[in-house]
Image (tube, helix red, strand yellow):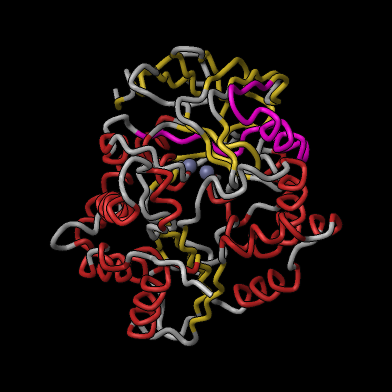
Amino acid sequence: MTIVPNFQTVVDPQKLEKLAEVAVKVGLRLEKGQDLVITAPLPALPLVRLITKHAYKAGAGLVTTFYSDEETTLARYEHAPDASFDKASDWLYEGMARAYANGAARLAISGDNPMLLAAQDPAKVARANKANSMAYKPALEKIANFDINWNIVSYPNPSWARQVFPDVPDDVAVGKLAEAIFAASRVDVADPIAAWAEHNANLKKRSTWLNGERFAALHFTGPGTDLTVGLADGHEWHGGASTAKNGITCNPNIPTEEVFTTPHALKVEGHVSSTKPLSHQGTLIDNIQVKFEAGRIVEAKASKGEEVLNKVLDTDDGARRLGEVALVPHSSPISKSGVLFYNTLFDENASCHIALGQCYSKCFLDGASLSQEQIKAQGGNSSLIHIDWMIGSNQVDIDGIRADGARVAVMRKGEWA
Ligand code: ZN
Ligand code: ZN
């Protein structure tokens, strides 16, 4: 038996400790007595141990971690019977949903190899993803509807680091990815907690301005892009820290650079081109070009991964419609790093983006009190999927369009106007 090395010695222990502290105190704002459910890839064990320590120091009731392993995921694709690919651990997700209903917080550590399933049969990947999405729904709803405080942070798994820095030895790649994660997560400074407070205040200023403007639509123009994204009735912009329905103000994504809201599911028109590759559950989808009519994608092309893209779009009707539009300046630290992470948590924070699928109910005025029917009536989309992809660059301009048709410059050449 061989143990996969995780090159822990090249990961700065002080910064890793700060990341764990930020995850608990900024990302989750874990409350005394609150239980915590963690999911993590096996190489992230050093970070799980530090987060668990800080969670108990913050008064956590019970911390429970579920680990995943890339080799065992691949074993299924190589050896499982065909019927396996329509199965998912619904009992596990039902248990998680029960934990959240009972007040537990949720922390996910990302770090898997983005290309893990690239060589597997796309039909099997799509079936397994669909079965998993359906089983996950009761737990995901509690997260997507922001019932509870939750957070995602990352750990530099060797298999991920190898993808991002393919030309250097594995230990060097892990060290470089660790530093990129620490910088993007703002834990490479003396006082990360204060740095996050300042960053949250800046994001709040942007979302407050956009909420005051109450645009009816945003118009994106750039190479291969002429897209009008109607915004949902009663939409609300969010960014940085926000308050979950359980009353806890947390920072779900670390890092985060975006301000985002809900598009109108029936009011998106025109065409748009992706500006960065999308890594979707093991497949790279590149140079996406889609055409929208009355909010629905009627044509989709990609230079790479087109088959997977079209399978994703066929998940359900909502998969062809938008559930999120987000603004990120081109000068964001992640964009400036020049690193393509092949991981949405990072890459979506390098660029303006849109998401196919499920909308966030919190992105409506008084969203917490709206029923699913009301959200739909106001233009909110619903789907089993939520997939972000990048459409911003230093060549993209964005106008806000008011209800009376007047235009206001929002971004020019990828920067706030
Ligand atoms: Zn986003
Ligand atoms: Zn998103």
Residue 89 visible, this orientation = yes
Task: Give residue 90's quadrant in the image.
Answer: bottom right
Quadrant position of the C terminus in the picture = top left
* Towards the viewer: 12 or 54: 12
Give coordinates of residue 408: x percent, y percent. Answer: 38, 18
- x and y percent of residue 245 in the render? 53, 64
Residue 369: x percent and y percent?
62, 56
Measured along the vertical axis of the image, is residue 63 above or below residue 9?
Answer: below
Nearest the viewer among 9 and 280 is 9
Q: Is residue 297 placed above or below 233 in the rendered structure?
A: above
Vertical placement of 191 versus 301: above or below?
below
Q: Is residue 31 left or right of residue 268?
A: left
Outermost residue, front direction? 1
Q: Quadrant of residue 140?
A: bottom right
- Asked whether residue 304 is drawn in magenta, I would say yes
Q: Nearer the viewer, residue 232 or 288?
A: 288
**Magenta segment boundaries in residue numbering:** 300-328
Q: Identify whether 402 is placed above or below 262.
A: above
Residue 45 is a magenta residue = no
Query: Is 136 or 342 nearer to us in this picture?
Result: 342
Q: Is residue 347 left or right of residue 203?
A: right
Residue depicted at 30% across the width and 57% down the height: 171
What residue is drawn where x is 68% and y is 76%? 95
Q: Residue at x 45, y 12 (%)?
A: 223
In the drawing, does residue 329 fall left or right of residue 235?
A: left
Which residue shows up at 49% across the image and 32% down it?
277
| Residue 234 can be seen in this image | no
